[in-house]
Image: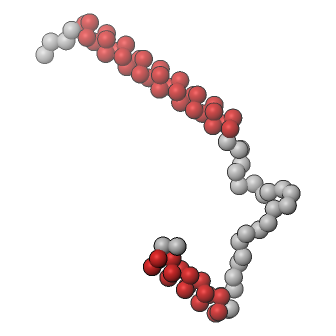
Amino acid sequence: MIFSVRRLIELIRFLLVLITCTLVSYGIITLLSERFLPANPYHEPHGNAIKVVKIIDNSDRHDMDWYYSRLQLFFMVGE
């Protein structure tokens, strides 16, 4: 098998440019994500926040039947 030195140098240069461009683009994406995304998106809200989760008791059978019927409707109709 014959290797050309010129083709080997071109391959090495291509790989170096590819790796450099990959690292630069990764750095830019990381910098932009740190700049625009919040540090902790799950922090406790401040101000007039309303809790939207209602914990239900298993002892209240009527509520559970309503949730089961809504779940069945969702699976059948998709709404």
Task: Specify the farthest residue to the right.
Answer: 47
Give the side of residue 45 with respect to residue 74, left or right.
right
Vertical position of residue 32 compared to residue 15: above or below: below
Horizontal and vertical percent for residue 33? 63, 37
Looking at the rendered image, the quarter that the N terminus falls into is top left
Residue in the foreground of this view, choosing between 72 and 39:
72
Q: Residue at x 25, y 7 (%)?
A: 5
Give the side of residue 7 with respect to residue 34, left or right.
left
Vertical position of residue 38 compared to residue 57: above or below: above
Vertical position of residue 47 compared to residue 53: above or below: above
Quarter of the figure with residue 9:
top left
**Count of numbered labels shown in the rendering:** 0
Q: Residue at x 61, y 87 (%)?
A: 66
Give the side of residue 51 with respect to residue 66, left or right.
right
Horizontal and vertical percent for residue 51? 77, 68
Residue in the foreground of this view, choosing between 58 and 77:
77
Quarter of the figure with residue 44:
bottom right
Horizontal and vertical percent for residue 61? 64, 93
Quarter of the figure with residue 10:
top left
